[in-house]
Image (spheres, grey):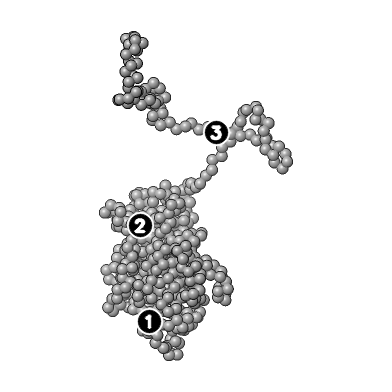
């Protein structure tokens, strides 16, 4: 059973004193020139902080365009994105998350100067979430519009027109890690692919934490890890992302939002958010990659419903690690690599936030696993059957190749047919009535015929002998 997102339950609830209160999307107040200049970044390398907008009043589409002028984002109209998605048709529907429905589409190069033709995913804001939904939309525009990294999903553009809020992303053909790890019908995900995804996700988080203005992702989970055609990792859904503590501050105090099973325990109890909160969430996902289990699964036994509570004690014991490894991999993984990944997960899941490693340290610890091949990797294979035909009449047969007749010799490798218990018993006791093909009925012509046969002199003579 998938974990319950707290985001969906809290998106419409206002909290007194909450520092996440967004600029209102409905008021159309006019800004002065000084207000507009305050929104611009001080230099080309600096990033506009989302928290700086908390007291700025209304953010109009014009203000947003000016603020993100150097971000290379395209501002689309509602009519353009409606045409891109085929009128938001069901045929292009990809799914629905806490933000709203997502549709597949394709933008043409002529739609905007400098825009490359490419497939895209269009996320449409569900207006039922009110101002919190607008806040999440705005957070994604600000963070993904200004942050570029190979392990972050690329935001192509947005739509801010009347009550319409949309985001346009690069299309990720392999969808999410959650789909491949828990809902795939194509067999188990290979070990090296799992570790490649783990390293890519760790690099994405490390980039966010090491930024000039640190970013705390706050909603790291399997469904937010997208995969391209080569299974390269891209972090998506920055609606809950927050600017990290700055100066002498040690944490950010905010409302408790995220997904059950992934949030750090100290964040749940106090609302204090730090980069180490993301490290804990990464440890949960790494444990999911090792075990093939979801963070919360209410269909399992009581003591196994919480993956962290059940699996963490095994992570530091190499002789018991096999108990939590995904059986679907059929032991096709590096034992040394699994032990190394398990130790990293164990440290990330520490109850003491200060004891957890940084994401840069996690990347350094996991990267060597990609070069560990101390296991026999068994993949798809093909049987070649060579059949030899000894029939003299067929010896002259051949195959025409480039106008010439070439003799073809076919050999056959016969394999003994597997015999079941019944087959072996039938072979040993061929006259046993257990294997008789005739079914005798208590009443009917078969029993009548048997009674008549038993009354014949030949039968009595045979029995007497």
Residue 400 lies, in percent from the top left, at 69, 39
Q: Secondary structure at mark 3?
A: loop
Which residue, given by chain and number where applicable, does mark 3 sit on?
413
Instruction: Give the Cα separation between the discs numbered 2 and 3.
Output: 46 Å
Measured Cα–Cα span from mark 1 to mark 2: 40 Å
- Residue occupied by mark 2: 294
User: Mark 1 highlights which residue?
Assistant: 26
192, 119: nearer the viewer = 119
Compared with 237, 312 (above or below) is above
Quadrant containing the N terminus is: bottom left
Q: Earlier in the sequence, mark 3 or mark 1?
A: 1
Residues packed near mark 2 inside 10 Å, few (<14), some (14 to 19) or many (20 plus): many
Of 257 and 43, the residue lying toward us:
257
- Asked if the residues shown at circle 3 and circle 1 are in contact, with their CB atoms under 8 angstroms apart, the answer is no
Is residue 119 among what the camera can see?
A: yes
Q: Residues within 10 Å of mark 3 (few under 14, many from 20)?
A: few
Q: Is residue 13 found left or right of 70 in the rendered image?
A: left
Q: Quadrant of the C terminus?
A: top left
Residue in view at x 44 percent, y 75 percent: 141
Helix, strand or loop at label 1? It is loop
Of badges 3 and 1, nearer the viewer stands: 1
């Amino acid at each position: 059973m998938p974990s319950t997102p707290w985001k969906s339950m809290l998106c419409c609830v206002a909290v007194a004193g909450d520092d996440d209160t967004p600029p209102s999307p409905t008021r159309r107040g006019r800004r002065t020139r000084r207000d507009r200049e305050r929104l611009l970044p001080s230099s080309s390398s600096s990033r506009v902080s989302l928290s700086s907008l908390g007291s700025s009043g209304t953010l109009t589409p014009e203000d947003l365009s000016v603020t993100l002028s150097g971000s290379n984002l395209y501002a689309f109209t509602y009519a353009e994105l409606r045409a891109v998605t085929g009128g938001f048709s069901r045929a292009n529907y990809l799914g629905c998350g806490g933000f709203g429905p997502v549709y597949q589409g394709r933008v043409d190069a002529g739609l905007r100067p400098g825009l490359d033709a490419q497939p895209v995913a269009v996320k449409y804001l569900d207006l039922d979430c009110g101002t919190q939904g607008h806040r999440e939309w705005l957070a994604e525009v600000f963070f993904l519009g200004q942050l570029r990294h190979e392990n972050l999903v690329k935001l192509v553009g947005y739509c801010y027109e009347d009550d319409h809020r949309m985001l346009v992303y690069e299309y990720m053909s392999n969808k999410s890690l959650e789909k491949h790890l828990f809902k795939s019908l194509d067999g188990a995900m290979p070990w090296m692919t799992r570790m490649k995804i783990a390293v890519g996700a760790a690099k994405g988080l490390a980039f966010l934490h090491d930024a000039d203005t640190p970013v705390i992702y706050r909603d790291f989970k399997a469904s937010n890890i997208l995969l391209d055609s080569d299974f390269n990792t891209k972090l998506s859904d920055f609606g809950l992302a927050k600017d990290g503590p700055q100066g002498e501050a040690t944490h950010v105090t905010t409302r408790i939002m995220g997904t059950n099973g992934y949030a750090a325990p100290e964040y749940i109890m106090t609302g204090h958010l730090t980069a180490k909160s993301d490290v804990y969430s990464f440890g949960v996902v790494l444990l999911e990659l090792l075990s093939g289990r979801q963070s919360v699964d209410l269909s399992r036994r009581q003591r196994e419903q919480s993956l962290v509570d059940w699996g963490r004690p095994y992570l530091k014991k190499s002789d018991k690690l096999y108990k939590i490894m995904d059986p679907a991999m059929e032991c096709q993984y590096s034992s040394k690599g699994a032990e190394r990944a398990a130790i990293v997960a164990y440290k990330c899941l520490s109850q003491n936030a200060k004891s957890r490693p940084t994401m840069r340290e996690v990347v350094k610890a996991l990267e060597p696993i990609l070069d560990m091949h101390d296991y026999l990797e068994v993949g798809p294979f093909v049987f070649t059957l060579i059949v030899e035909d000894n029939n003299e009449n067929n010896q002259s047969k051949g195959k025409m190749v480039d106008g010439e007749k070439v003799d073809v010799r076919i050999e056959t490798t016969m394999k003994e047919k597997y015999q079941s218990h019944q087959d072996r018993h039938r072979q040993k006791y061929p006259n046993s009535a257990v294997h008789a093909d005739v079914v005798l009925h208590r009443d009917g012509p078969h029993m009548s015929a048997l009674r008549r046969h038993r009354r014949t002199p030949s039968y009595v003579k045979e029995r007497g002998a």
